[in-house]
Amino acid sequence: MTEAQRRALEVDWPAFGIDIDPDQREKLELTDIFGRAADKVVEIGFGNGDNLVEYARQDPTRDFVGIEVHRAGVGHALLQAKELGLRNLKVICHDAVEVLEQRLADSSLSEVLILFPDPWHKKRHHKRRLIQTPFVDLLARKIKTGGLLQLATDWEPYALQMREVIGASPDFSNCSDELGGSDGFVPRPAWRALTRFEKRGQRLGHGVWDLSFRRVSL
C-alpha cells in the first residue's frame, strides 16, 4: 500500500466508504446513503477501481457500490473518486458474499459486475471459484427483474464454467444473441474500462471472454 492510498483510507473514507459492522444485520438503505432514488450498480472485487470509477463517471444518473477486500485497491479507488469529485460512488471493504447475504435488500440492484475474478486454476481449487450455483442463486435474489449480471475473465475454462452455471439458472437469460455475440459470449462492452492488466494480457496474446445475463421473472 502506498502512502497516498493509506492516507486516502484515513481522510477520504468518510466521504466514500460504507462501514460494515459484522454484528449488524439491518439492510443498508442505499437510497438514504446516496441521498436519492436511482438505479444501483454493484461491482464485486473491483481491484484497484479503474473500471468502477470510470463507469461511475460515465453514468452520473446511477449510483455505484464497489466491494473489495484488499485495502490497497480500495485506497486507490478512493484517490480516483476524490480527484474526479464523484458523488455517485461508494465503496465497501468487506467480504462480498456476506454483504450480499446480510446487508443488501432483495431485488435492489439493477446491475452486478464481476470482472476477472480469481480463476483458481488448479482443479482441486475449483470449488473456491466465486461463480457456483449457490452464489448465482444469491445474485438472482438481489438483482431486480430486467437487471443485468455482467462478467469477464481471461481464463477460458472459467469462462466456460460461468456460461454453464449461470446458463443453467432459470433466473437468468443469456444476452449473447441480442448483443451480437456468439457461443454464449458477448463482445467487449464499451462501458468496461480497458485496464493495465487486460492491456498486458493482450500484448501476451491472452483472450478475454465477456458474458452478460438478464434477470428474468419466473
Image (tube, rainbow, N blue to C red):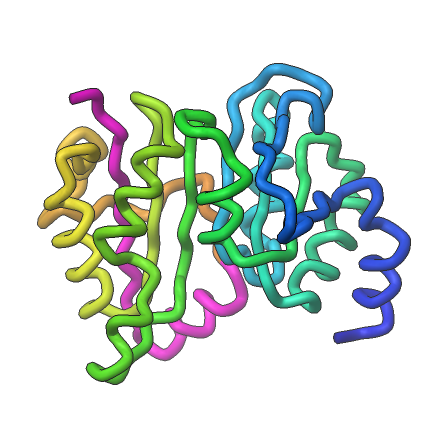
Q: What stretch is highlighted in magenta?
A: 195-218
Task: Indicate the position of residue 127 as horizontal and vertical percent values.
Answer: 26, 71
Q: Is residue 178 magenta?
A: no
> Which residue does the image show at 90% across and 53% down from the upper left?
11
Q: Quadrant of residue 47?
A: bottom right
Task: Indicate the position of residue 201 as horizontal and vertical percent values.
Answer: 40, 73
In this rendering, position of residue 44 left or right of residue 131 = right
In the image as oriented, which residue stretches furthest toward the front?
A: 23
Q: Can you say whether 136 is above or below 57 in the image? A: below
In the image as oriented, which residue stretches furthest toward the top?
A: 37
Q: Can you say whether 110 is above or below 136 in the image? A: above
Q: Is residue 212 magenta?
A: yes
> Which residue does the image show at 21% across and 21% down from the upper left?
217
Question: How many circles with numbers are drawn on the protein?
Answer: 0
Can the viewer see residue 10 in this picture? yes
Task: Indicate the position of residue 21 as horizontal and vertical percent values.
Answer: 68, 50
> Which residue does the image show at 25% across and 57% down from the upper left?
132
Quarter in which the C terminus is drawn: top left
Q: Can you say whether 162 is above or below 73 in the image? A: above
In this rendering, position of residue 147 left or right of residue 83 = left
Task: Indicate the position of residue 167 as horizontal and vertical percent values.
Answer: 14, 45
> Which residue does the image show at 75% across and 75% down from the upper left?
1
Can the viewer see residue 180 in this picture? no
